[in-house]
Image: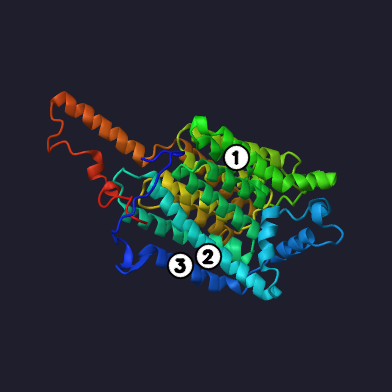
Amino acid sequence: MSRAGEETTLPDYSADTGRIARWLPVRRHHALLAGWTVLWFVLVARSGGVSWHYLRQGEQLLFGSGKGGGLSLYADHPELQIGPFSLAVARIFAPFPPATGQLLAEATMAALGLVMLILVGRTAAVHYLGTGTNHRRLQQRILVAGLAFIPMWIEVTVRFAHLDDALTLFCTTLAVHALARGRTWAVAVFLALAVDAKPWAVPFAVLLLALPVGRRRGPFLLFCALVAVAWLPFYLGNLDTMAAAKFAIPNQPASSLRWLGVNAPDTPFWDRPVQFALGAALGALAVLRGRWPAVVLLCVDARILLDPSVYTYYSASVLLGTLLWDAVGARRLVPWWSWIALLSLYGGTLVIPSDATRGLVRLAFVVVSALYVLFWPTPGKRVRNRRRARTRSARTTGSVGSGSTNSAAARTPDLVGPRVDAAW
């Protein structure tokens, strides 16, 4: 199995397993997910772009010469909780007519979701390199999890057109892929870009702890430098920017905060720092326990647990966390957590009329999912334990290498068949 932080290169196999045809290097599950993405895009695009005006306003203020813009952007407009990297990318769509620019932005963001699914599949392939894992089953796992991920991705990218959240999650996916490939400096760059896109990605920085001990300092310093380059000019340009961090939003009745006894009408002063601290602590615990693929899910769990708002697009970040866990952290054929997240967090908003009940469901999902990914034995670990037990038993009976002592992996459905390191 490939370890995080160790440079890994995928062999270039010519096997066409999973392709639509030998002459077309497109995997069947990629084609199905692409069609699924297009379908959801068409269904949602007519009512999309709910928040795109914030991106347009922000990029015009940042790059314009009018009052309240430039380095005073966040001081004068604290409601624009959008990172400078996101506003710079939004600038790409500024030359087009407003409606055309919005549609192009939504289509681009929707396509990024498909790219993320491919990256997660390749991350899992690298992670299980050399274990004999069946890559057909891994493709099926990505397909089933992707069917749950795409609707929520379209929610955040098309219905709400949150370019900042989309870039944050995309850069985080790139960071996870770089981590699996052992590209330490790239991990730092992508994590910094995620924070520069939107500040709530700060806890994801604990992924740097998954790097080898002797190779953490440089990437950590690079991460800090890139974040400082993006954000520090605004704080130095206008000291009132500090007040933007205190921007409060309503504490909605369906939030988990209500179940925790926080009934304040707006965001408590302690809420954001505790969100960051709890997410980082849970993520660090996951790395300590050798479960770094759970970091994203745990950090997002902390966010939705303590966030006063319950917007549906929040669930996209949860679905990325469950996707990474189902594909990389777990070895089950059926990605249960992706569908549990979709049905409980998104489906619950559609079918549960009670605000208090929806808040309880959110709280239950956070607690159960966090405990599961941190402490529940993973299938891979159980397979290894059974293999060790059978090896010890075989040694005591003198039957090592005989036909009666096939390895546990040979009888585990998810470990049988073509290797996962065939070209994805």
Residue at 74% over, 52% down? 250
Q: Is residue 109 left or right of residue 384?
A: right
Residue hosting label 1: 279
- Of 215 and 105, the residue lying toward us: 215
- Name the element at disc 3: helix
Q: x and y percent of residue 95 in the render?
A: 70, 71
Classify residue 298 by image quadrant.
top right
For the N terminus, the quadrant is top left
Q: Is residue 171 left or right of residue 58?
A: left
Q: x and y percent of residue 196 in the render?
A: 66, 49
CA separation in Å, label 2 and label 1: 28 Å
Question: What crowding class fits label 3: few (fewer than 14 Cα within 10 Å), some (14-19), or many (20 or more)?
Answer: some
The numbered mark at residue 271 is: none
Could you tell me if residue 414 is visible in this image?
A: yes
Q: Is residue 140 left or right of residue 283?
A: left
CA separation in Å, label 3 and label 2: 8 Å
